[in-house]
Image (tube, rainbow, N blue to C red):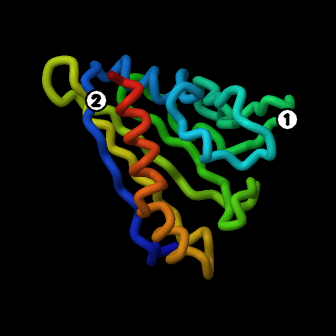
Amino acid sequence: MIETTDAVRREVVVDVPPDRAFHLFTADMTRWWPAAHHIGSAPIAEIVIEPRTGGRWYTRHEDGTETYTGIVQAWEPPSRLVVTWQIGSDWKYHDDLVTTVEVHFRPDGPDRTRVELVHRDLDGYGADAAAMKETFEGSGAWGATLAAYAAAAK
């Protein structure tokens, strides 16, 4: 399939080495992920990315429920993570919707890392693809999420 909707690209530089940047992004997501960015009915208790290809990316909520975000497609610490984003335009998980979030952690000088995030396969949203791209490019989406991540890396 030829992609007609361009990917969303965002990046941030953090003052930690790549191994720490990767760990913070994957194992400590609960600490920095914006609380308003969740799909469950209860507040977030923990966000989990299981540390392996095929692992789940999900949120455990304070009421004990779990909501799924996607699956780990590539687990390559400390340089690369690829996960599916299976949240529809209705902000619910859909097992038949697969968009992809790829994150690279590149050295950018001593104890600095350039974190590059690409959200692609947006054509999976069908008629909602352009609107979802606009949402993901908005100031409150991936940009705000990476800003929260960078703030936690200080």
Residue 105 appears left or right of 87: left
Query: Badge 1: how crowded within 10 Å, few (<14), some, or many (20+)?
Result: few
The residue that label 2 is drawn on is 14
Mark 1 near mark 2, Cβ–Cβ under 8 Å? no
Q: Nearer the viewer, residue 138 or 120?
A: 138
Q: Residue furthest right?
A: 64
Residue 116 appears left or right of 41: left
| Label 1: which secondary element | loop
- In which quadrant is the C terminus drawn? top left
Q: Position of residue 130 (x, y in %)?
A: 50, 77
Query: Badge 2: how crowded within 10 Å, few (<14), some, or many (20+)?
Result: many
| Residue 148, numbered label | none
Disc 1 and disc 2: Cα gap in Å? 33 Å
Q: Residue at x 54, y 69 (%)?
A: 132
Vertical placement of residue 37 versus 137, above or below: above
The residue that label 1 is drawn on is 65
